[in-house]
Image (cartoon, coloured by chain):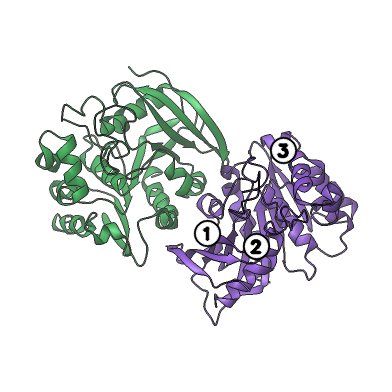
Chain colours: A green, B purple
């Protein structure tokens, strides 16, 4: 059982409240974990609000999304909460975890590690899918977890797509992503992460942590929106591979109403790009969260 | 004469372009100065666009406004450029300028220093009102400087109001401010800045650099919007004094159509507050910039 939440700070914004919490996370092996939660002003015990989960990219923390993403205004006007988790455990003290920017601290890849070296702490999948809803619910915060969608950027786009496609009871109503790592078993970032975190390496990842593999064998209806920029250097370096995801989706007979992948001319990998389409993504999810 | 602009970086955002420039600033005594410029997509040599100048607060740089302010979306949809100058000279090497957060580097107070210790470098008034328009125009960037308005936050709100009210040829069409230092000759921040930068100290500042003093003796029609938050600790500590400005404006017969001062319940001094009302302020200025 996790300890109760501790409020770190709280600021009024767009008529609602952006609050930073910390707590001792059981999923992350007892480490202290932070998250931010935006609650729109219409949330109350008699009016629980739907929630969007935002997963940030490599090197980010729980702060990047709300500081730079321009999500709070659209979420406020739609009456939707946004949960901003961290991207990895912090302070596990595992040898080598702080050496690289694309592995270890700040790069949890939204999976549950099976390599014994990491498995006590690197369980961001459980932290986000199970633990955070549980501790937030236990704290009496008025969120309706049955109306939950998920989105993210880059590594967080990978997290959003894979958590959406692999959640057994359709935990999320819709998923969207900015510049997602769409086929990580075929790109350097994913190969490195899976080789490190998973005992079965890339082969193990194909079962659970690769959006392109997951959409290929998925049978359920889906609601997915993806944007990427044509001036994105990581796209050019084949770290993102959105075309692979799109091809697998079309091969599996998902049409453009179920899976939409948009290339945005001239945009790069940054929050300049994300903020531009932030409102689009929040409104996409509102269609399903408020249905 | 200043050297030509050097482009540091450029990112597409909200269909327009956010570019960071640097140049050797004559107004700042030959120091290298940075600024950011957002140019909406409709700007072209045959369609020069109006411009809003955003002045940031104490400790900030040319980056805070566009990263956290949520101004680019509204500016893009209105077809208005935004210029984000720095808040002070950098690297003047004057003894003591880096000691305090509210004086010296990061705290230029948008004035022209008359104390010989600072007067070679601390000339942010000239830098913003004259130099930046000149060098940007010389670079062929399609901005219509006859359609210019100004806004800012905290110390930058002070800058916006005083530059608006003191500009001899009505350089700016309108001014607005978030949590401005509204009567700086009567608050600790202003007293300290004026005692340091001006040979005549606070008395000299009353003539040129105090919005409350300036509105009291102004005769021209004005367009001013001010927002402040009631949970703002600097407001509570009497650093901002917006009531003094409002009283002086009403005593000078400016009605609520010419000078509007709004207290926003529960908001603090931060960019959480600014971003909430960013769209409001851009649209306020659009009324005059596009008239």
Residue A26 appears in the rendering: yes
- Closest to the observer: A140 or B273? B273
Residue projecting furthest to the bottom = B46
- Chain letter for mark 2, please: B
- Give the residue at mark 2: B29
x, y percentage for residue B261?
Answer: 75, 49
Circles 2 and 3: CB atoms closer than 8 Å = no
Label 3 and label 1 in one chain: yes
Give the residue at x 63% y 70%: B133
- Residue beneath label 1, please? B72
The mark that comes first in sequence, 3 or 1, is 1
Label 1 SS: helix
Task: Report how far apart the C-alphas of labels 3 and 1 lie in the structure.
Answer: 27 Å
Q: Closer to the camera: disc 3 or disc 1?
A: 3
Q: Which residue is mark 3?
A: B235
- Indicate the position of residue B13 as horizontal and vertical percent values: 45, 61
Element marked by disc 3: helix
Crowding around mark 3 (Cα neighbors within 10 Å: few <14, some 14 to 19, many 20+) is many
Both marks 1 and 2 on one chain: yes
Dividing the picture into quarters, in which one does residue A202 lie?
A: top left
Q: Would you identify the image quadrant in which residue A29 lies?
A: top left
In this rendering, would B183 be left or right of A24? Answer: right
- Dot 2 alpha-carbon crowd within 10 angstroms: few under 14, some 14 to 19, many 20 or more: some
Please say if B3 is above or below B231.
Answer: below
């Amino acid at each position: 059982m996790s300890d109760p939440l501790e409020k770190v700070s709280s600021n009024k914004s767009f008529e609602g409240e952006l609050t930073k919490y910390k707590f001792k996370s059981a999923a992350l092996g007892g480490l202290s974990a932070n998250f931010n939660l935006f609650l729109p002003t219409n949330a109350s015990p008699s009016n629980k609000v739907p929630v969007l989960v935002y997963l940030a990219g490599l090197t980010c923390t729980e702060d990047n999304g709300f500081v730079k993403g321009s999500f709070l205004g659209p979420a406020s006007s739609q009456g939707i909460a946004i949960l901003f988790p961290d991207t990895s455990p912090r302070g596990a003290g595992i040898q080598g975890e702080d050496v690289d920017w694309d592995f270890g601290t700040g790069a949890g890849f939204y999976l549950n590690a099976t390599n014994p070296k990491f498995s006590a702490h690197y369980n961001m999948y459980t932290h986000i899918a199970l633990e955070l809803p549980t501790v937030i619910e236990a704290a009496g915060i008025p969120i309706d977890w049955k109306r939950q969608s998920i989105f993210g950027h880059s590594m967080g786009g990978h997290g959003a797509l894979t958590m959406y496609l692999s959640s057994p009871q359709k935990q999320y109503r819709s998923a969207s992503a900015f510049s997602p790592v769409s086929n990580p078993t075929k790109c350097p970032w994913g190969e490195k992460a899976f080789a490190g975190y998973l005992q079965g390496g890339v082969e193990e990842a194909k079962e659970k942590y690769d959006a392109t593999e997951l959409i290929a064998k998925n049978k359920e209806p889906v609601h997915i929106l993806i944007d990427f920029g044509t001036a994105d250097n990581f796209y050019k370096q084949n770290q993102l591979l959105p075309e692979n995801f799109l091809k697998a989706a079309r091969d599996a007979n998902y049409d453009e109403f179920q899976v939409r992948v948009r290339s945005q001319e001239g945009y790069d990998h940054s929050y300049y790009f994300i903020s531009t389409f932030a409102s689009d993504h929040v409104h996409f999810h509102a269609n399903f969260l408020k249905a």
